[in-house]
Image (cartoon, helix red, strand yellow):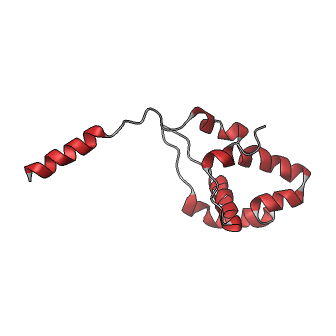
Amino acid sequence: MGAILAATAVIFSKRKRRKEWAKDWLRERETYGAYSTLLTELLLEDDQEARRFLRMSYESFQVLLACVRPLIEKKDTWMRKAIPAGERLAITLRYLGSGKQYSCHLFVALFIF
């Protein structure tokens, strides 16, 4: 029993402590992220591209979001802001529509420049 506790203590003592919860550039998701900036721009200028981005019409997206929001919405904490339910749904729809997994940094920085 003592050996198990000692081994567990060694494993946990070697674990690196996280310096930060989120990278600075990820915190700027609201300013530069594809969901917040690109989708807004697409809805104003090009309905077809907005449909391709969301994999459905914006009206259908809003109906679906209203249905699933209570299930996927997270709360903000004092450490970080939660990813909004709409952004979570958009990422999921893009994944389901393409079958490809988009990394978080690609989705956030997709159309910064």
Drawn side of residue 4 relative to residue 68, left or right? left
Drawn side of residue 59 relative to residue 20, left or right? right
Q: How many marks?
A: 0
Residue at x-position 26% and y-position 38%: 13
> Which corner quadrant holds the C terminus?
top right
The quadrant holding residue 66 is bottom right
Residue at the extreme right of the image, as rendered: 45
The quadrant holding residue 23 is top right
Residue at x-position 29% and y-position 39%: 14
Q: How far across and down, in percent of the image, does residue 54 sit?
A: 75, 60
In the foreground, 18 or 45 = 18
68 versus 22 height, above or below: below
Residue at x-position 61% and y-position 39%: 26
13 versus 49 height, above or below: above
In the foreground, 47 or 73 = 47
Drawn side of residue 37 relative to residue 92, left or right? right
> Which corner quadrant holds the N terminus?
bottom left
